[in-house]
Every structure is written in C-alpha cells, then in structure tokens.
Amino acid sequence: MIKDRKLDILVKQTIELLAPAKNLACGIAAIDHGADAVYIGAQRFGARVAAGNPMEDIAELCHYAHQYGAKVYVTVNTIIYDNELEDIQQLLKKIEKAGADAILVQDSSFFTLHSSLPLHASTQTDNRTSEKVRWLRSMGFKRVVLARELSVEEIRKIHQEVPDVELEVFVHGALCVSYSGQCYASQYCFGRSANRGACAQFCRLPFDLVDSEGRMIERGRHLLSLKDLCQIDHLEELMEAGAVSFKIEGRLKDVDYVKNVTAAYSQRLNQIIARHPERYQRASKGRITYTFEPNLKKTFNRGFTTYFLHGRQPNIFSPDTPKALGEYVGKVKEIRRDSFNVAGTASFANGDGLCFFNAKELVGFRVNRAEGNRLYPFKMPVGLKPGIVLYRNNDMEFERLMAGQTAERKIPITMTLEAVDGGFTLNGKFFAAEHQQAQKPQRENIVRQLSKLGGTPYVCEQVKLLPEDFNYFIPSSMLAEWRRKVIENAECRMENNEYNLRDDSAFDSEKGNHHSTISDLRSPLNTRFPYLYNASNAKARAFYAAQGVPNATSLEFPITTDEKKEEPLLMQCRHCLRYSFGYCVKNGGERPAWKEPLYLVSDDGRQFRLEFDCRNCQMNVYGTSMKDK
C-alpha cells in the first residue's frame, strides 16, 4: 500500500501488467488475455523498426483498451536526428489525438517538444540507480523503466529513495546483454543503430575467446547470448519492492506468444492479489474466461533465467545456441531406419518441431507422423542416437488451440431498475415513462431484456427490480432502448477514464523540485566516451550543455579526431564471462591461467577486447580504434 499525502490514509497499490503489441491484433489479444496496458510502436521512431503501426490502428487499439480501463503507451524511444525534429513534433500530435495514455522516450530533445502526453523514461535511458531515477523525475518523468539487470534489493532501494516515481520492470522475454541504450556493437560493426531501432543482434553471434597470447579458451560459442527472462515465480517480491508495472518483452513476437504469456502472468497476478486484497488491485477492469491452460514453455524461449534478481548467477547465458529450445520432451530410446521411440510422458502430433544438440550444434527437424511415442521424421536427422535429449520448439496441438478464440474479457455489472416519480431509473439514469401496472408477471422478460449485453465489454450478473413489489409493464423495445443508453453512458465514462483506479496522488509534485544535473551523475566512462549520452540532434546537445555536459554526442553522429584514437566502448554488460566460467576470484572462483586482456573473435576475424571492471562488477566490450577502421 501507499500513503495518500492529501488524505493521510493508506490506499491500495495499483498493479499493471504491460504486454507488447507488434500490431493491432496483438494489442487486442493482449487486452483480451489480461493486460492492463499495452505498448505499441508508431510508424517511425520506435526501438523496433520492424514493428511500426499506422495511427488509425493505434486509435482503434486505444478505443478497445479504454473500454476496460486499460491503457496504451506508444514507443517513441529512438534517438532523433535534426531533420526529424519537426516530424516527431507532428507525430506527437497524432499520438495524442489517437487517445494514447503515455509515450516512452529516450531522446532528451523531448524535454523541449510540446506535448501533454505523460512521459515514461524508456529503459534505453539506462536507468540503474536511484540518482538517475531522481534526476529523471526532476525532468518531469512520471514513470521510469528500470534496467533489466537490477536485483530486487536494488529496485527496493530505488523505490525507497524515490517513492514518487512509478517503477516499471521487465518480467519476461529476451534479454539484451548490454545495458539498454549503451550498446553500440550493431552500429559499429554493421552500420545498424540499436538506438535507432535497427539492432542486428551482434550478441547472438558465435565467437572464439582467446587471451593476449593467442591461446584459444573457447571456440565458436555464443558467449554473449543470454537466456530469456522469466520472473513469474517472483512477482510478489517485485511488488513488495515497489514495482508497479510488469513488462513482457516482445514487440516482434506473434499473437500466440502474446496470448500465452499475458494469460500466464495475469493469472499469477490475480492469485497474488487474491491473497492480499487489502494491499493491491489491478489497474484495469474485467473478468477473463480462458479456453486454454497457459504454458510458458510452449512459446519461444532460449531457456529461462531470473537474471540478477537475487544477485549474480552462473547460468544466465546460453553459449551453445541463440535459438529457441522449447520444452524438454524426453530422451531417444531406440532408433530404426525411418523412425525412433521417445522415452518420456510427452504426447506428440504430426508436424511437431523437435531439436537436439549434436556435439555443440543445435539440430532441428520436423515430425512427419507420430504414432504414440514412435516418431517418423520427414528425414532422419544426422547425429540422432539413443540417450540424446529432445526438446520441442514447435507444438502443433498447442498452435491449433491458440489459433481460435482463447479468451473472453467481460466487465460484470448489475442492472438496477427502480420505479421513481415520473418514470424509472436504470443504473441511476432517469427515463420518463408511465407507471402501468402489469396484468401478468414481468420479471422474466425484464431480466432477459436487460441482460442482452452481447457485443459490449459487459456481462450482466444480476438484475435488481425496486421496490420489492415491482409489478409494472414496460415494452421490450423501451427496455432495450434504456439498456442501450445506459451501456453507452458506461462506455463513455470508461473511455474518459472516470473508472480509472490508478492512484495519482503521489505524482502531483512540481516538475523540477530536485536541482541536480546530469553532470552530477557522470561516470568516468561518460567522460571518456561522450557518445554514451546518445545526443544526436542540436536540441539534445543544447540540453546536455545546459546540464553541464558541453560535449555530449552520439556514435551515429560524426565523432572527433580525438575520439577516433580511442578503442570505442561498444557494450557495458553485467554478464561476465570470467564469472560464468568459474574464474571470478572475487566471488570464490579459481584464478585463471590465461593472460589478459581477453578477446572475442568473430567469424570474420574482428577482435573485441574485454575489460573486467571488478570494482563495478561489470564486463566492458571494446572495438578497434576508429582510426583503424
């Protein structure tokens, strides 16, 4: 619970499940399956350049979501170039007109643009500390999306020190190995800027790991590829720590992923809130009926990790493959010429996709025919042998189930019809009509007429007639008209957020009440590499200059001669290979025999130096100096 400073009482904390929307269909599916809010990209300037949407679709999604008191946030979280500033200003007007509830932003030029939309600080703004969150609050941000790398205790500390900011945390989906907004590998290697929504997924590539003497430590492994995040068993901890919005990653994921993952997390949140109804409440309305059992293992995943939720863990990366493994289904028991038998309890269907590791290579194949646990592949895969572990990354039965309508969301209401002077009221709305005594019982027809709410977000749970001796004749056509007007009024009130349960009392302090500047937060890395500020336009650079940083720039912007002499910092990672391989002395590991520095070597021979910053428990990845490129 949080304290209302105006009323000096304790109020329930509103909890939001935030789901991704690649497009309108995914957004509607997210709302239907339990999301309290969705985030979606406009046609331009979203951090997933392949997931843009026309404004008409965003407006339709806003209308649909608002019926349930749910919200729509539009991602405008790329860095902006000078020649785009006018376009972004026009886009903000269109987003506002479409009915969006907030925008997620990264570029500091937004501080100088005109919009009444609430600002959410994207995780691209690199939000790791309470000092950074406090500064963002002073700049007018109502909500901050925290770095994925934070532990529950770090989140708790931020909430305690900056309680008047909504904290949004990722709880499920793919993980970037670098702190978001601080990854320049894609831009450096391929000319595709992650901060412009065009990440080429450098971190999913295979690398050799060699030491300074050329000694091979690891060969051809995906050393920067992380497992996928899954915090479904730790939501209550995060709620207690002060997080209020729980974000599912996946604006490039299809509708089946959105349905399954949203349903799983929504049901779990409801279970937690049912145990603590005095402390928490959901941010939107509606009761959902599902026709399937959510199963997170059934949709795309690289294996799951809780990442740094409880501190540093050794099993957060998946060096053998960046692809989806899916769910474990058993081991190969016996092999024939054209088929094999699986030992295990899983059932199979024609068309299932299976995979296994042959040495360190992931091999995938499709089941042409399944007869119980005897499987006939279209072509027998090379390397399959008894004892090999099998995973299913494409479940045809689950796909068929998810292809239909899998959920229905309705807001339960009571229709109360009361006889009053001069007519009747239906749910408080007055209708002038004559009181005509009925010759035969009317209750059954009245209940039937007032309960016809198909095609609306509502379902009638009860019809009350007052007074108790209610015995009036009302034509069915009149009842239908009254019902229609009452529902229209309810939908209008929901659209205008009159039923919004979010507590905003904690966010009424004046913008700018904290007087620190971004220069107070600079690290030595920011001083060495001013492109870490991602200032790619004149307004952004002027903003940082006023904040005490006169040389802020971006890697996409032409850099100075002095900067070309430096090895560029491409990534800042909490993931540490020294720790993952058991050689972090600080954490009880062995002392390594290799000679540092270590280098990642890509397939094309390029080297990337690793720096182990033990003081900050961080691994940095550097490229070759720009003058050598």
Image (cartoon, grey):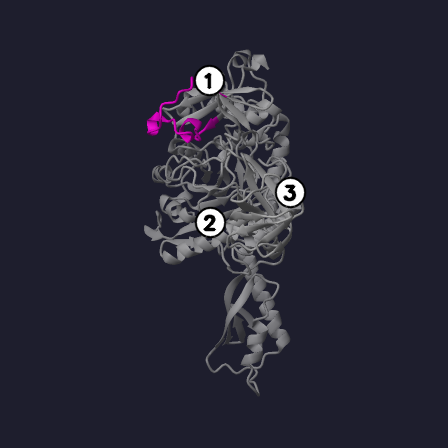
Q: Give neighbour class at mark 3: few <14, some 14-19, many 20+ (Cα, 10 Å).
A: some
Q: CA distance from mark 1 to mark 3?
A: 38 Å
Residue, disc 1: 528
Kindly indicate the quadrant of the structure image that contains residue 489: bottom right
Question: Could you tell me if residue 24 is visible in this image?
Answer: yes
Percent across and percent down for residue 574 are 43, 30
Q: Give neighbour class at mark 2: few <14, some 14-19, many 20+ (Cα, 10 Å).
A: many
Q: CA distance from mark 3 to mark 2?
A: 23 Å
Residue 300: numbered disc: none
**283 horizontally vs 299: left or right:** left
Q: Earlier in the sequence, mark 3 or mark 2?
A: 2
Q: Earlier in the sequence, mark 2 or mark 1?
A: 2
Q: CA distance from mark 2 to mark 1?
A: 39 Å
Q: Give neighbour class at mark 1: few <14, some 14-19, many 20+ (Cα, 10 Å).
A: few
Is disc 1 placed on a helix, strand or loop? helix
589 magenta-colored: yes
Question: Could you tell me if residue 60 is visible in this image?
Answer: no
Over which residues does the magenta segment extend? Answer: 572-599
Q: Earlier in the sequence, mark 1 or mark 3?
A: 3
Q: Amino acid at mark 2?
A: Glu
Farthest bottom residue in view: 439
Q: Amino acid at mark 1?
A: Arg
Residue, disc 3: 53
296 magenta-colored: no
Residue, disc 2: 16
